[in-house]
Amino acid sequence: MISFPDIDLLAYLNSVNEILQASVSQQQIISEPQNNTDKQNFAKEGLRIHKHENCEKCAFCGNEIGEKRRQLLGSYFNDEIRKLKNRIKSGIKKINTELINIQSIKVINNSDFYEKFSDRIKLLNSEIKTIKVNYKEYLEKLRSTLNEKSKNLFAKSDELKTEIPADFAEIKKNYNEIAKENNDFSDNLTAEQENAKDTLRYHEIKKALGNFKYGA
Protein backbone atom coordinates (compact mmCIF):
# COMPACT_ATOMS: atom_id res chain seq x y z
CA MET A 1 0.00 0.00 0.00
CA ILE A 2 1.19 3.51 -0.84
CA SER A 3 0.86 6.27 1.74
CA PHE A 4 -0.15 9.73 0.51
CA PRO A 5 0.61 12.86 2.59
CA ASP A 6 -2.13 14.83 4.28
CA ILE A 7 -0.76 18.39 4.17
CA ASP A 8 -2.93 21.35 5.20
CA LEU A 9 -1.88 23.68 2.38
CA LEU A 10 -4.28 26.43 3.47
CA ALA A 11 -2.75 26.46 6.96
CA TYR A 12 0.69 26.94 5.41
CA LEU A 13 -0.56 29.84 3.30
CA ASN A 14 -2.25 31.48 6.30
CA SER A 15 0.91 31.11 8.36
CA VAL A 16 3.06 32.67 5.63
CA ASN A 17 0.65 35.58 5.29
CA GLU A 18 0.74 36.16 9.05
CA ILE A 19 4.52 36.44 8.81
CA LEU A 20 4.25 38.77 5.83
CA GLN A 21 1.97 41.07 7.80
CA ALA A 22 4.40 41.16 10.73
CA SER A 23 6.93 43.97 11.13
CA VAL A 24 9.57 44.85 13.68
CA SER A 25 9.37 48.04 15.71
CA GLN A 26 12.47 49.46 17.36
CA GLN A 27 12.82 49.92 21.13
CA GLN A 28 15.44 52.62 20.77
CA ILE A 29 14.99 55.66 18.55
CA ILE A 30 17.85 56.32 16.16
CA SER A 31 17.27 59.24 13.87
CA GLU A 32 19.20 58.04 10.82
CA PRO A 33 17.33 54.84 9.90
CA GLN A 34 13.99 55.79 11.43
CA ASN A 35 11.04 55.15 9.08
CA ASN A 36 13.41 54.21 6.26
CA THR A 37 13.39 50.50 5.48
CA ASP A 38 16.49 50.63 3.27
CA LYS A 39 18.51 52.37 5.98
CA GLN A 40 17.21 49.96 8.61
CA ASN A 41 18.29 46.97 6.57
CA PHE A 42 21.63 48.65 5.87
CA ALA A 43 22.24 49.26 9.59
CA LYS A 44 21.21 45.70 10.46
CA GLU A 45 23.66 44.26 7.93
CA GLY A 46 26.43 46.51 9.29
CA LEU A 47 25.75 45.30 12.81
CA ARG A 48 26.04 41.71 11.60
CA ILE A 49 29.34 41.95 9.72
CA HIS A 50 31.34 43.95 12.31
CA LYS A 51 33.30 42.16 15.02
CA HIS A 52 32.30 44.50 17.85
CA GLU A 53 35.87 45.13 18.96
CA ASN A 54 37.24 48.28 20.59
CA CYS A 55 38.39 50.96 18.15
CA GLU A 56 36.81 49.06 15.26
CA LYS A 57 36.14 51.18 12.20
CA CYS A 58 33.00 51.07 10.12
CA ALA A 59 33.53 49.07 6.94
CA PHE A 60 31.26 51.46 5.08
CA CYS A 61 32.35 54.95 6.14
CA GLY A 62 35.67 54.34 7.90
CA ASN A 63 34.66 56.10 11.11
CA GLU A 64 35.35 54.52 14.48
CA ILE A 65 32.39 52.70 16.03
CA GLY A 66 32.01 53.65 19.68
CA GLU A 67 30.74 51.33 22.38
CA LYS A 68 27.72 53.56 23.00
CA ARG A 69 26.82 53.35 19.31
CA ARG A 70 27.09 49.57 19.31
CA GLN A 71 24.87 49.28 22.37
CA LEU A 72 22.34 51.63 20.83
CA LEU A 73 22.20 49.59 17.63
CA GLY A 74 22.00 46.38 19.66
CA SER A 75 18.94 47.71 21.47
CA TYR A 76 17.48 48.98 18.21
CA PHE A 77 17.62 45.53 16.66
CA ASN A 78 15.96 43.81 19.57
CA ASP A 79 14.35 40.46 20.35
CA GLU A 80 11.50 41.20 17.97
CA ILE A 81 13.87 40.69 15.07
CA ARG A 82 15.19 37.42 16.45
CA LYS A 83 11.67 36.12 17.05
CA LEU A 84 10.50 37.04 13.55
CA LYS A 85 13.66 35.62 11.93
CA ASN A 86 13.28 32.38 13.91
CA ARG A 87 9.65 32.12 12.82
CA ILE A 88 10.67 32.54 9.20
CA LYS A 89 13.46 30.01 9.62
CA SER A 90 11.07 27.52 11.22
CA GLY A 91 8.54 27.98 8.41
CA ILE A 92 11.18 27.39 5.74
CA LYS A 93 12.37 24.27 7.56
CA LYS A 94 8.86 22.82 7.68
CA ILE A 95 8.32 23.57 4.00
CA ASN A 96 11.61 21.86 3.13
CA THR A 97 10.45 18.77 5.04
CA GLU A 98 7.16 18.73 3.13
CA LEU A 99 9.03 19.06 -0.17
CA ILE A 100 11.11 16.00 0.72
CA ASN A 101 7.95 14.07 1.62
CA ILE A 102 6.33 15.01 -1.68
CA GLN A 103 9.41 14.02 -3.65
CA SER A 104 9.48 10.61 -1.94
CA ILE A 105 6.00 9.66 -3.17
CA LYS A 106 6.35 6.86 -5.70
CA VAL A 107 4.00 5.97 -8.50
CA ILE A 108 2.05 2.74 -8.30
CA ASN A 109 3.86 -0.36 -9.51
CA ASN A 110 1.72 -1.82 -12.29
CA SER A 111 3.19 -5.28 -11.74
CA ASP A 112 1.58 -5.41 -8.28
CA PHE A 113 -1.84 -5.52 -9.93
CA TYR A 114 -3.59 -7.82 -12.37
CA GLU A 115 -3.63 -6.85 -16.04
CA LYS A 116 -7.32 -5.90 -15.95
CA PHE A 117 -6.44 -2.89 -13.74
CA SER A 118 -3.59 -1.66 -15.94
CA ASP A 119 -5.40 1.27 -17.57
CA ARG A 120 -6.75 2.58 -14.27
CA ILE A 121 -3.30 2.37 -12.70
CA LYS A 122 -1.75 4.34 -15.57
CA LEU A 123 -4.36 7.09 -15.20
CA LEU A 124 -3.85 7.21 -11.44
CA ASN A 125 -0.06 7.45 -11.84
CA SER A 126 -0.51 10.37 -14.25
CA GLU A 127 -2.65 12.17 -11.67
CA ILE A 128 -0.09 11.48 -8.92
CA LYS A 129 2.70 13.02 -11.00
CA THR A 130 0.59 16.12 -11.72
CA ILE A 131 -0.27 16.69 -8.08
CA LYS A 132 3.36 16.22 -7.06
CA VAL A 133 4.40 18.95 -9.51
CA ASN A 134 1.63 21.28 -8.28
CA TYR A 135 2.58 20.72 -4.63
CA LYS A 136 6.24 21.36 -5.38
CA GLU A 137 5.54 24.64 -7.18
CA TYR A 138 3.16 25.79 -4.43
CA LEU A 139 5.52 25.02 -1.55
CA GLU A 140 8.50 26.52 -3.35
CA LYS A 141 6.51 29.72 -3.86
CA LEU A 142 5.80 29.87 -0.11
CA ARG A 143 9.46 29.27 0.66
CA SER A 144 10.61 31.95 -1.77
CA THR A 145 8.16 34.43 -0.22
CA LEU A 146 9.54 33.75 3.26
CA ASN A 147 13.10 34.21 2.01
CA GLU A 148 12.14 37.61 0.59
CA LYS A 149 10.47 38.57 3.85
CA SER A 150 13.67 37.77 5.77
CA LYS A 151 15.31 40.63 3.84
CA ASN A 152 12.63 43.12 4.85
CA LEU A 153 11.67 42.75 8.50
CA PHE A 154 10.85 46.38 9.23
CA ALA A 155 7.71 46.78 7.14
CA LYS A 156 4.60 44.79 6.41
CA SER A 157 4.61 42.92 3.11
CA ASP A 158 1.71 42.29 0.77
CA GLU A 159 -0.17 39.08 1.42
CA LEU A 160 0.53 36.20 -0.92
CA LYS A 161 -2.42 35.34 -3.10
CA THR A 162 -2.06 32.00 -4.83
CA GLU A 163 -4.31 29.13 -5.81
CA ILE A 164 -4.19 26.11 -3.53
CA PRO A 165 -3.64 22.89 -5.54
CA ALA A 166 -5.88 19.85 -5.23
CA ASP A 167 -4.84 17.43 -2.51
CA PHE A 168 -4.37 13.66 -2.58
CA ALA A 169 -7.80 12.82 -1.13
CA GLU A 170 -9.33 11.66 -4.43
CA ILE A 171 -6.12 9.87 -5.41
CA LYS A 172 -6.11 8.01 -2.09
CA LYS A 173 -9.76 7.04 -2.47
CA ASN A 174 -9.31 5.70 -6.01
CA TYR A 175 -6.12 3.86 -5.10
CA ASN A 176 -7.77 2.13 -2.13
CA GLU A 177 -10.69 1.08 -4.34
CA ILE A 178 -8.40 -0.45 -6.97
CA ALA A 179 -6.31 -2.18 -4.29
CA LYS A 180 -9.45 -3.71 -2.75
CA GLU A 181 -10.78 -4.84 -6.14
CA ASN A 182 -7.39 -6.33 -6.97
CA ASN A 183 -7.29 -8.26 -3.68
CA ASP A 184 -10.89 -9.46 -4.10
CA PHE A 185 -10.10 -10.60 -7.62
CA SER A 186 -7.06 -12.46 -6.30
CA ASP A 187 -9.13 -14.18 -3.60
CA ASN A 188 -11.82 -15.17 -6.12
CA LEU A 189 -9.21 -16.39 -8.57
CA THR A 190 -7.61 -18.53 -5.89
CA ALA A 191 -10.98 -20.01 -4.95
CA GLU A 192 -11.78 -20.72 -8.60
CA GLN A 193 -8.40 -22.42 -9.04
CA GLU A 194 -9.01 -24.61 -6.00
CA ASN A 195 -12.48 -25.52 -7.30
CA ALA A 196 -10.96 -26.42 -10.68
CA LYS A 197 -8.35 -28.59 -8.97
CA ASP A 198 -11.04 -30.36 -6.94
CA THR A 199 -13.16 -30.94 -10.04
CA LEU A 200 -10.17 -32.37 -11.90
CA ARG A 201 -9.23 -34.52 -8.91
CA TYR A 202 -12.75 -35.95 -8.61
CA HIS A 203 -12.78 -36.65 -12.32
CA GLU A 204 -9.51 -38.60 -12.10
CA ILE A 205 -10.81 -40.53 -9.10
CA LYS A 206 -13.97 -41.42 -11.00
CA LYS A 207 -11.91 -42.61 -13.96
CA ALA A 208 -9.69 -44.73 -11.72
CA LEU A 209 -12.67 -46.31 -10.02
CA GLY A 210 -14.19 -47.08 -13.43
CA ASN A 211 -11.00 -48.78 -14.56
CA PHE A 212 -11.00 -51.04 -11.53
CA LYS A 213 -14.72 -51.72 -11.94
CA TYR A 214 -15.17 -50.68 -8.37
CA GLY A 215 -18.94 -50.99 -8.50
CA ALA A 216 -19.02 -54.56 -9.88
Image: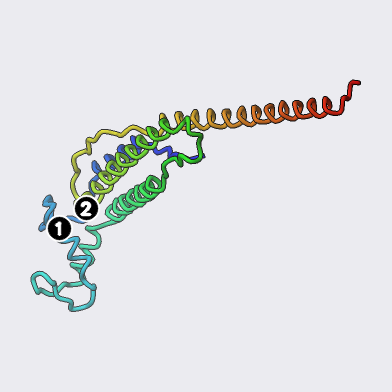
Q: Is residue 163 above or below residue 104?
A: above
Task: Give the labeled residue for mark 2.
Answer: 26
Gap in angstroms between the C-alphas marked 2 and 1: 9 Å
Colour mapping used in the image: rainbow
Q: Residue at x 11, y 52 (%)?
A: 36
In the rendered image, residue 105, in percent from the top left (x then y), is placed at 41, 44
Q: Residue furthest bottom?
A: 55
Q: Residue furthest top?
A: 216
Using the image as rendered, state which of residue 96 and residue 62 is in the foreground.
96
Using the image as rendered, state which of residue 11 and residue 53 is in the foreground.
11
In this figure, what is the number of numbered marks? 2
| Left or right, 18 with reference to 189 | left
Q: Secondary structure at mark 2?
A: loop
2 and 1 marks in contact (CB < 8 Å) = yes
In the rendered image, residue 188, in percent from the top left (x then y), is placed at 61, 27
Q: Is residue 74 above or below residue 155?
A: below
Q: Secondary structure at mark 1?
A: loop
In the rendered image, residue 157, in percent from the top left (x then y), is placed at 19, 43
Q: Residues within 10 Å of mark 2 (few under 14, many from 20)?
A: some
* Residue 93 circle label: none
In the rendered image, residue 66, in percent from the top left (x then y), is placed at 17, 72
| Left or right, 127 with reference to 46 | right
The amino acid pointed to by label 2 is Gln
Q: Residues within 10 Å of mark 1 (few under 14, many from 20)?
A: some
Q: Is residue 95 above or below residue 188?
A: below
Using the image as rendered, state which of residue 102 and residue 62 is in the foreground.
102
Q: In the rendered image, which quarter contains the C terminus? A: top right
* Residue 30 circle label: 1
The amino acid pointed to by label 1 is Ile
Q: Is residue 89 above or below residue 5?
A: below
